[in-house]
Amino acid sequence: MAKKKAYTDQHAAAGIDAPLPAIECWPNQYRTGYSIEIATPEFTSVCPKTGLPDHGTVTIRYVPDRQCLELKSLKLYLLAYRNLGIFQENAVNRILQDCAKACQPYEMTVTGEFTPRGGVYSNITATWARPQE
């Protein structure tokens, strides 16, 4: 019986630094009192170890400051994950990192609700808040 290959540091870091399309923003006209929620129910990436696709819904919730995420560029950014080998946990954290960097919100949360694979369901949430001034 052949022994299965273990997860490696390369598997763990896969996709974290991959080049992805830029996320554009537009000037926010209403800077207080509201939040934005964007959901993409057809998010797809690839497991870096097995090569199997991961499917799920990615939801981005944020309180904008001066900039709002532009939806077309965000869509192209998220579509770039389709062929990217990256763990689900890393994808959620990378999306948070890139979106927060792009628009510098007051706070942001990204949730990935992934469809079951092998009877296992995962729901990953990552949050970011602007440091207190």
Image: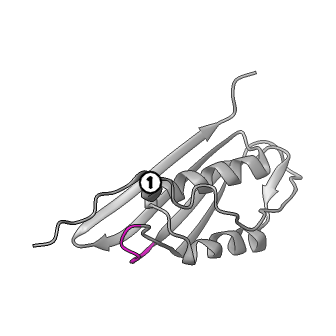
The front one of 36 and 91 is: 91
Asked if residue 5 lies left or right of residue 66, the reply is: left
Q: Which x, y percent locates residue 57?
A: 49, 69
Q: Residue at x 42, y 64 (%)?
A: 113
Q: Which residue does the numbered mark 1 point to in the structure image?
A: 12
Quadrant of the snapshot with the N terminus: bottom left
Residue type highlighted by circle 1: Ala
| Residue 89 picture quarter | bottom left
The front one of 47 and 132 is: 47
Asked if residue 128 lies left or right of residue 132, the reply is: left
| Residue 2 picture quarter | bottom left
Q: Residues within 10 Å of mark 1 (few under 14, many from 20)?
A: some
Residue 122 lies, with reference to residue 30, above or below; the image says below
Quadrant of the snapshot with the C terminus: top right
- State the residue lying farthest toward the left: 1
User: Magenta part of the protein: which range?
Assistant: 49-55
Residue 59 lies, with reference to residue 117, above or below; the image says above
Asked if residue 71 lies left or right of residue 111, the reply is: right
Q: Secondary structure at mark 1?
A: helix
Q: Is residue 35 visible?
A: no
Q: Residue at x 50, y 69 (%)?
A: 85
Q: Is residue 18 visible?
A: yes
Q: Which x, y percent locates residue 21?
A: 75, 68
Q: Which x, y percent locates residue 13?
A: 50, 53
Q: Residue at x 79, y 65 (%)?
A: 70
Judge whether residue 44 is colored magenta: no
